[in-house]
């Protein structure tokens, strides 16, 4: 067993080197053993390297620290140490008011109440401690491109656990597919030069030390907080959304109201020009209809019914269905983030604003565009022109076809009886 | 009946001139192109519609082809108006298409015949009441389709004058009138011209323009007799050696 090798190595060291108390500051003695590349132990059947590369530590944020500044459990112990190292407690330095100038403990308390921190507290061995994300001897500042928590390295760092199918299955959380869909998303693909990396990485939305599940009220990705989270970057859209019927309803605590991801998707998010996007012109109709064709939601909030089928029956709807991306979809007229009820004077579909709204595609649109329904639903009371024309034509076509077919049947019957064998004789020339 | 015409079973008469046959073919082609590119929009929820639109090369191409069909049909309609107004043959045929009281009596006469109140069918002239009805229906239908079609094509210009609801009505009229025209053609026209017993599966008149003497006697006796009479009158001076 490896442990035997380690122990024997340590014993050799003990005989060869004069036994002494390990100095509080010096690292040289530790490295006598730990600089050996083959030095390792086995924990839970896994081989764990005990090798420490001095240069790595020297390049880290803790370059000026000695081994026992962190591994305090070896202070004052005889060398070589006999027991295993205890997990390092980062908070011994990283607390508020620390004298070393280490980043303070606010993140630490947030961590304790995060989904990760609580799992660690419960003894979940899969849950990440500081080192799972920050590293150990190679901890670097966030601004260092080699840091595990440098912006562009964050997706990779999170993926270490979140693509490990053993972990994701055990905890019932999204795994490799979710990470893959993020990697293909507009957030991952768009590079923001100001941010030194992808437009949005995991922590931008989920938080850093305060990561919580979306079902928790305080989570940055919980429905009530989501608009503000997306709004950190999408400031203008957030301001517009908050004034919309959807934004106001969500702020009032109506959980059925859509937040950002209900329309845009989560990790899969794409720009509206991407054919796979949920807000691509030909997908918008289905996206809006998730709620607006839901009978429960329609009745609960008194939403106008028959919006989808009246749209589909219009020329806009038919052309959209067959892939015409220029033709009007829901958002073209109703807006996207600024959707307001038609009663609102600022609404794009307020009768007064219709000429302007229609004019986006139909230059020079006049007041005539507002004279009549857009979602035509003919009845004896509304859209009467279409209603009566339909009735007239239906009756007319039915009557005409019945006459045609009746005549043809009579004709065929007469011919079958041979009655057309005319015996005109002199009649033909008279 | 003189001997000259006693053995004339293989004689043919000109029913459609080459000019008229070309008009017919252009009208027919544009009509079916319009039907094929238009019905998938009217019946967009039918299972076959996506395949038809894909066949035409997508929705934009469908729209373009529909307009090509429209321009062609309008072109042949305009040509036909000039043909009917300014050519001798066209004008004669046009006037022969005009309905009169005899057509009503003929229709009643057909009913009497079908229900056994009469032994003989009415005797028809160059165009019977069925053909006249078809011609006038085609004319009226074309006017309706062209007007509503233009409203929908140039919707922005149309709505400088018309309210939105009028466009909706135009769209509905365009759709129903199309259905009406399509059904009239494939039921009424096809039966009386091509599918009725004795002609089935197809009359060749639209291709070669010729109608047999037998068919002339059967279907258009009044016209037949008029032609024979005119020929006899024209030939009599010939027999006496005068100028033909």
Image (spheres, helix red, strand yellow):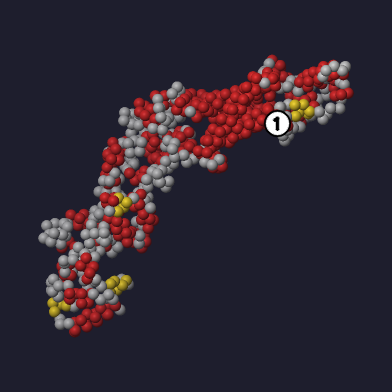
User: Compared to A379, does A164 lie above or below?
Assistant: below
Between A86 and A11, the residue placed more toward the observer is A11
**The N terminus of chain A appears in which quarter of the rendering?**
bottom left
Point 24% across, 65% down: residue: A138
Q: Taking the image as drawn, is residue A348 in sight?
A: yes
Q: Pinpoint residue A87: horizontal percent, then vertical percent.
A: 21, 67
Point 22% across, 73% down: residue: A84
Q: Pinpoint residue B233: horizontal percent, then vertical percent.
A: 82, 17
Between A55 and A202, the residue placed more toward the observer is A55
Point 71% across, 16% down: residue: B102
Q: Taking the image as drawn, is residue A378 in sight?
A: no
Point 23% across, 75% down: residue: A35
User: Compared to B6, does A137 lie above or below?
Assistant: below
Residue B118 picture quarter: top right
What residue is pinned by disc 1?
Answer: B206
Residue A53 picture quarter: bottom left
User: Compared to A418, does A206 lie above or below?
Assistant: below
Between A12 and A149, the residue placed more toward the observer is A149
Q: Which residue lies most toward the top here? A: B101
Q: Pinpoint residue A67: horizontal percent, then vertical percent.
A: 18, 70
Q: Pinpoint residue A110: horizontal percent, then vertical percent.
A: 21, 54
What count of labels does the image hold? 1
Q: Residues within 10 Å of mark 1 (few under 14, many from 20)?
A: some
Q: Which residue lies most toward the bottom here? A: A15
Asked which secondary structure carries label 1, the reply is helix
Residue A228 picture quarter: top left
For mark 1, name the chain: B
């Amino acid at each position: 067993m490896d442990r035997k090798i380690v122990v024997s190595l340590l014993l050799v060291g003990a005989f060869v080197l004069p036994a002494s108390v390990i100095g509080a500051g010096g690292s040289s003695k530790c490295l006598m053993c730990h600089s050996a590349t083959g030095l390792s132990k086995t924990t839970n059947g896994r081989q764990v390297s005990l090798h420490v590369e001095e240069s790595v530590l020297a390049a880290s944020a803790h370059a000026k620290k000695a081994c026992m500044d962190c591994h305090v459990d070896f202070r004052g112990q005889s060398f070589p140490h006999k027991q295993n190292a205890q997990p390092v407690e980062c908070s011994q330095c990283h607390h508020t008011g620390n004298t070393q100038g280490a980043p303070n403990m606010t993140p630490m308390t947030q961590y304790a109440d995060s989904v990760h921190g609580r799992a660690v507290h419960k003894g979940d061995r899969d849950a990440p401690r500081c080192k799972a994300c920050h590293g150990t001897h190679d901890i670097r500042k966030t601004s260092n491109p080699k840091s595990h928590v440098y912006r562009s390295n964050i997706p990779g760092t999170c993926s270490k656990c979140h693509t490990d199918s053993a972990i994701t299955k055990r905890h019932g959380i999204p795994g490799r597919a979710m990470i893959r869909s993020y990697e293909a998303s507009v957030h991952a693909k768009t590079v923001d030069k100001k941010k030194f990396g992808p437009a949005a990485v995991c922590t931008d939305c989920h938080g850093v030390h305060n990561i919580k599940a979306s079902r928790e009220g305080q989570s940055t990705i919980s429905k009530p907080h989501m608009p503000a989270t997306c709004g950190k970057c999408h400031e203008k859209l957030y301001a517009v959304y908050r004034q919309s019927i959807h934004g106001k309803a969500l702020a009032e605590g109506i959980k059925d109201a859509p937040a950002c991801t209900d329309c845009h998707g989560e990790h899969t998010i794409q720009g509206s020009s991407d054919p796979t996007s949920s807000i691509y012109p030909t997908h918008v109709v289905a996206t809006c209809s998730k709620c607006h064709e839901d009978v429960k939601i329609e009745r609960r909030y008194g939403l106008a019914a028959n919006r989808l089928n009246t749209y589909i029956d219009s020329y806009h709807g038919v052309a959209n269905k067959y892939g015409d991306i220029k033709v009007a979809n829901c958002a073209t007229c109703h807006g996207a983030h600024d959707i307001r009820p038609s009663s609102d004077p600022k609404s794009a579909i307020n009768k007064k604003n219709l000429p302007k709204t229609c004019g986006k595609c139909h230059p020079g649109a006049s007041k005539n565009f507002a004279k009549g329904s857009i979602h035509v639903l003919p009845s004896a009371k509304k859209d009467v022109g279409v209603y009566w024309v339909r009735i007239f034509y239906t009756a007319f076509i039915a009557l005409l076809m019945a006459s045609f077919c009746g005549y043809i049947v009579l004709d065929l019957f007469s011919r079958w009886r041979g009655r057309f064998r005319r015996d005109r004789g002199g009649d033909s020339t008279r | 009946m003189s001997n000259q015409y006693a053995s004339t079973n293989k004689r043919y008469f000109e029913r459609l001139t080459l000019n008229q046959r070309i008009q017919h073919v252009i009208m027919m082609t544009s009509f079916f192109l319009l039907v094929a590119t238009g019905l998938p929009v009217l019946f967009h929820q039918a299972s076959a519609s996506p395949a038809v639109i894909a066949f035409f090369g997508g929705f934009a191409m469908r729209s373009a082809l529909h307009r090509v069909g429209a321009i062609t049909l309008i072109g042949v309609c305009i040509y036909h108006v000039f043909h009917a107004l300014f050519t001798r043959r066209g004008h004669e045929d046009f006037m022969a298409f005009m309905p009169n009281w005899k057509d009503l009596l003929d229709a009643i006469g057909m009913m009497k015949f079908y229900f056994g109140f009469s032994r003989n069918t009415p005797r028809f002239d160059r165009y019977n009441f069925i053909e006249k009805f078809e011609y006038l229906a085609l004319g009226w239908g074309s006017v309706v389709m062209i007007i509503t079609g233009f409203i929908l094509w140039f919707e922005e210009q149309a709505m400088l004058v018309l309210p939105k609801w009028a466009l909706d009505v135009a769209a509905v009229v365009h759709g129903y009138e199309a259905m009406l025209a399509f059904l009239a053609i494939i039921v009424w026209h096809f039966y009386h011209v091509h599918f009725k017993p004795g002609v089935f599966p197809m009359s060749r008149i639209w291709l070669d323009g010729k109608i047999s003497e037998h068919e002339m006697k059967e279907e258009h006796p009044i016209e037949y007799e008029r032609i024979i009479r005119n020929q006899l009158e024209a030939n009599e001076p010939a027999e006496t050696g005068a100028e033909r």
